[in-house]
Amino acid sequence: MSTLNGIISLTRPYVLLTTTFFFIAASFLSVNGIPLLIPFFLGFLAVVLAIASAHTLNDYFDRESDQENPRTAQRAIPTGKVPPRLALSLGIIYGVSAVALTFLINPLCVILAFVAVPLPFAYNYMRKRQIPYSFLCTMIAVLFIILLGSAAASGQYFSSDILFFVVFGVSWEMGRTLISEVQDVDYDRVADVTTISATISSKRAAQLILVLFTLASIMSVVIGCFGQLGFIYLGFALAASIWLIYRSVELVRSPITPKAIEMLYRAPKYLVTICLIVILSLLLNTLFFGF
């Protein structure tokens, strides 16, 4: 049972569940309504497997540094719950399965899968903890998820309001990545890891997080306006954005590890809220208003 729990923990269930909302919202936005069930389901499963692969491989490649970092020393591989070879095998199986599923959808999804699924290997081999690799790889990952959602649902990469959603998603992901760096800044400095937070200081990193989340908030409103999602959507989006910006200001005032850890759990709540109201607004428009 401990091994099974360890295997599940390697996939980061909370992060995995949160990130899949990019795919779901992009699928609905790309058709401005309800996507076809079969390609949507296959694409969703491919994204889940791709994310699980990325997280599992991340822990495999980080197994030595995780032992030295007090925050990550309790992960499944450092504690012996999951043998490293098993983690590597599972990561590869997840990734290959994700690519295989895209062959059942359409050629656009296959192209995306072949580009994005090998990304964890590049991410880990290209000194991921140094500028600018971490940002580049996480941006590509979010771009992959959003474009796969659009391609699976509509057969196009950039349809409807997807471009605005891409800007929203990438801005949010860059902010979230910076938060992860701020929470580990003390360890990174000791280990001589050149992340942005360790290089420019936690204070300036927190200020950059505020800028990125403000941009994401603006994009959430733009999506509502151009997508004609209605006043209910705009009201929720504005309320959620004001909350996110307020919490970001708190981090700027006190850019310390405990605050960063709190923010790391708050930011996904904002993402899920925006994606949910996008989905619900499009559902209501389709079911009750016919557009």
Image (cartoon, grey):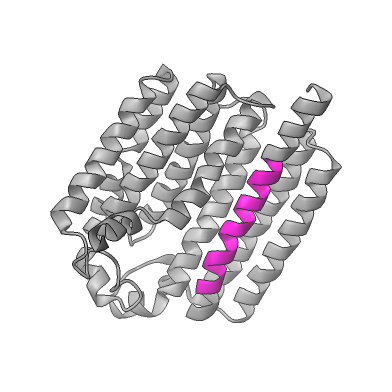
- Whether the magenta-drawn stretch holds residue 266 is answered as yes
Q: Where, by quadrant of the figure, is residue 82 drawn?
A: bottom left
Q: Locate the N terminus and report the quarter of the image it occupies.
A: bottom left
**Residue in view at x 54 percent, y 47 percent:** 170
* Quadrant assignment, res 268: bottom right
Nearer-the-camera pick, 42 or 201: 42
7 lies above or below 281:
below
Q: Is residue 265 left or right of residue 66?
A: right
Instruction: Tell me if residue 4 comes above or below residue 67 in the rendering.
Output: above
Name the residue at 39% across, 80% down.
186
Decide whether residue 145 is among the magenta residues: no
Q: Is residue 159 left or right of residue 221?
A: left
The residue depicted at 25 percent of the width and 63 percent of the height is 2
Query: Looking at the image, can residue 227 be seen?
Result: no
| Placement of the C terminus among the 4 image quadrants | top right
Most frequent secondary structure within the magenta stretch: helix
Tell which of 159 and 53 is nearer to you.
53
Q: Which residues are magenta?
A: 261-278
Q: Position of residue 158 (x, y in %)?
A: 58, 27
Percent x, y of residue 199:
42, 72
Q: Is residue 139 above or below residue 80?
A: above
**Furthest residue to the front?**
1
Residue 215 to residue 223: above or below: below
Q: Residue at x 75, y 37 (%)?
A: 281
Towards the viewer: 127 or 148:
148
User: How many discs mark residues in the rendered view?
Assistant: 0
